[in-house]
Image (cartoon, grey):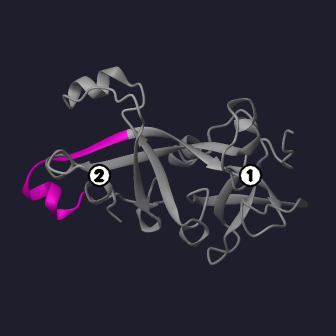
C-alpha cells in the first residue's frame, strides 16, 4: 500500500518575514535547487504548510513565504538515533579505507545531536580529528522515513520513505579503525 503525502518536495525553513519562526512547505518552483539558489542570492518562495513537522506536514495554507535560511529536514527532537549503514557496496570507498565489503551490513548509529543544518551553518571537525589529522567527511544520501518500519518486505520498502536529502558523514578515521564499533568515531555533534 503506497503512502500518499501532500507534497512532492518539502523544505523546513526560516522565513524572511519572521526570523524567529520555523515553517515547512513546498517550494513554488519545482525545478529549483533551494540551497543553491539561496547561496547564489536568489529569492526562493515556498507554499507554507499548516503542520509543525515534515513528519506531520498538515496541508497547504495558501500562504507564500520567502526563505531566509534552509534547515535540516527534521529537527533534532524529532529523531532518536540516526541509523547508518557502512560499506554498503561502495567498492571504491571500501578500497580507500582498506576494508572489504561485508556480507552482513555494518550498522552504526549517530546520536540526534549529530544532525546539522545545511549551508550556511558551519560544520566543525572535532578536536580529536584535528590532533590526529584524521578528519574525514563524506557526502551521503540520507533517507527520511515517514512512519515506523520493521520487517518490511523489499517490495513495500519505498512505501515508508518520506523523502531523500543530502548528509555529511564526518569521521575520525584513526579512532574508527581502532574500534569494532563506529559510533564514537562518527557520532560527533
The residue at the point 44 percent across, 56 percent down is: 120
Q: Residue furthest right?
A: 62
Pointer 2: residues within 10 angstroms few (<14), some, or many (20+)?
Answer: many
The residue at the point 72 percent across, 59 percent down is: 54
Q: Is residue 118 visible?
A: no
User: Can you say which quadrant of the picture contains the N terminus?
Assistant: top right
Q: How many marks?
A: 2
Pointer 1: residues within 10 angstroms few (<14), some, or many (20+)?
Answer: some
Kindly identify which numbered label has been placed on residue 182: 2
Please give the range of residues in magenta. Answer: 125-138
Frontmost residue, 101 versus 21: 101
Q: Is residue 84 left or right of residue 174?
A: right
Q: Is residue 6 left or right of residue 20?
A: right
Viewer-nearest of discs 1 and 2: 2
Whether residue 66 is in magenta: the answer is no
Kindly identify which numbered label has been placed on residue 45: 1
Vertical placement of residue 170 versus 93, above or below: below
Vertical placement of residue 175 versus 57, above or below: above
The residue at the point 57 percent across, 72 percent down is: 77
Where is residue 20 shown, x and y percent of the image? 63, 78
Amino acid at each position: 500500500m503506497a503512502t500518499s503525502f501532500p507534497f512532492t518536495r518539502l523544505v523546513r525553513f526560516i522565513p524572511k518575514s519572521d526570523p524567529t519562526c520555523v515553517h515547512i512547505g513546498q517550494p513554488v518552483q519545482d525545478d529549483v535547487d533551494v540551497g543553491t539558489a539561496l547561496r547564489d542570492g536568489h529569492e526562493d518562495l515556498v507554499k507554507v504548510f499548516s503542520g509543525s513537522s515534515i513528519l506531520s506536514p498538515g496541508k497547504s495554507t495558501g500562504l507564500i513565504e520567502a526563505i531566509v535560511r534552509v534547515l535540516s529536514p527534521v529537527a533534532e527532537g524529532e529523531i532518536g538515533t540516526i541509523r547508518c549503514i557502512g560499506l554498503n557496496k561502495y567498492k571504491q570507498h571500501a578500497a580507500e579505507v582498506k576494508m572489504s565489503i561485508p556480507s552482513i551490513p555494518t550498522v552504526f548509529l549517530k546520536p540526534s545531536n549529530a544532525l546539522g543544518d545545511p549551508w550556511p551553518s558551519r560544520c566543525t571537525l572535532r578536536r580529536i580529528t584535528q590532533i590526529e589529522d584524521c578528519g574525514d567527511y563524506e557526502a551521503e544520501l540520507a533517507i527520511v522515513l515517514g512512519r515506523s518500519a520493521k520487517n518490511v518486505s523489499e517490495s513495500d520498502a519505498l512505501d515508508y520513505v518520506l523523502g531523500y536529502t543530502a548528509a555529511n558523514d564526518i569521521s575520525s578515521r584513526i579512532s574508527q579503525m581502532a574500534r569494532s564499533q563506529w559510533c564514537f568515531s562518527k557520532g560527533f555533534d
